Image: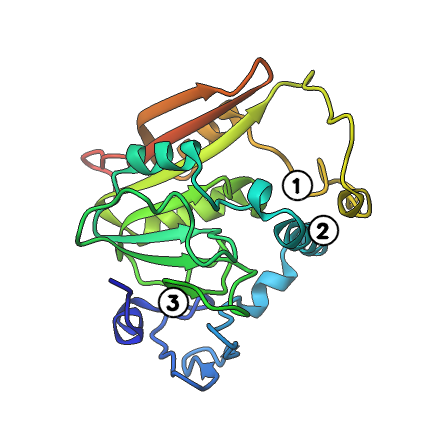
Amino acid sequence: MKVSLQEVNEIIRCPNCLKTIELKKSEDSQCYSCGEYYMKLPFSWDLIPSSFNSMDLGDIWKQLQANGMISYIEDPINNLSVGDRSDCHEFAQFCSFDGLVLDVGCGPQPWPSYFSHYSERTRFIGIDPLVGESAADYFQIRSAGEFLPFKDEAFDHVVFATSLDHVIDPVKSLSEARRISKQDGHINIWIGEKTPNAPKPETSNEWYKKLKRPENAEDVFHLKRLKLLDLAFMLDMADLEIIDKKSNAIDEYKTIYFLKTKRKPKIKGKI
């Protein structure tokens, strides 16, 4: 069942100040607490706050996002979670989606392939800086992982499906995911790790050759690719703990990891 606008308005918050706002079907929205203004898009709303544009590395991130959009248009099979993909089905089974699910960095496709295994009561919402210009089969909002526009403890699952290494600040994004997940909720993460000696493709498509790698970016799509060790440190910084993990070696150079995390238990005497 698709989440309704009325249901979204029960949990939506201004990403700038976290006060209540209302999304209207055919109008722009404004936060009357901080004055932030949010534009209505053809199929969504732009809830990226103005403060996001002042973040360090913002210009580099915009170029990487533009590169990503080109890859989605030119080669969606290899750059989006679409089609009958075994890795997507494995991730869905690992997550065991149930209840209200937020997909952070969902991508502009109408329905991700990892939304393939879920309970009858599951409902999905997606956020991504590139959505809103085309229709989707579930509720999507243009937003950023560092400023999730939802109230505290709203979601049963928060998902980063190969998207955590596309944000500017992974720790802030994980902290935001922790904030909006329920006390017993799960944050599900999928990353791919390559060894330093992984060979480059022998040939590249013409559209790929034209992409610009920004200075200080690891490649044309990532500020920095995440390794499992990096992620473990970031999870600790965000006050999250790993409760389940699965790995799958694609070949001798690449391994994908699925992680299920949750809030660390409170220690008595600490706030």
Left or right of 132 in this view: 25: left
* Mark 2, residue position: 60
Question: Is 49 drawn above or below residue 157 in the view shown?
Answer: below
Residue lying at 33% horizontally and 38% vertically, measured from the top left:
92
Image quarter for residue 59?
bottom right
Identify residue for label 3: 18
x and y percent of residue 179 in the render?
33, 51
- Nearest to N terminus: mark 3 or mark 1: 3
- The relative height of residue 209 versus residue 21 in the rendered view (above or below) is above
Q: Is residue 4 left or right of residue 218?
A: left
Residue 50 image-quadrant placement: bottom right
Q: Amino acid at mark 3?
A: Leu
- Distance between the Cα atoms at labels 2 and 1? 8 Å
| Sequence-earlier tag: 2 or 1 | 2
Q: Amino acid at mark 2?
A: Ile
Residue sitting at the far top:
252
Do labels 2 and 1 touch, CB within 8 Å?
yes
Q: Is residue 239 shown to the viewer in this render?
A: no
Image: 254 above or below 72: above
Q: Residue at x 73, y 27 (%)?
A: 201
Q: Nearer the viewer, mark 3 or mark 2?
A: 2
Q: Residue 7 placed where, x, y %?
A: 25, 70
- Position of the C terminus, as image quadrant, is top left
* Viewer-side residue, 204 vs 144: 204
Instruction: Identify the residue at image location x=56%, y=43%.
Output: 77
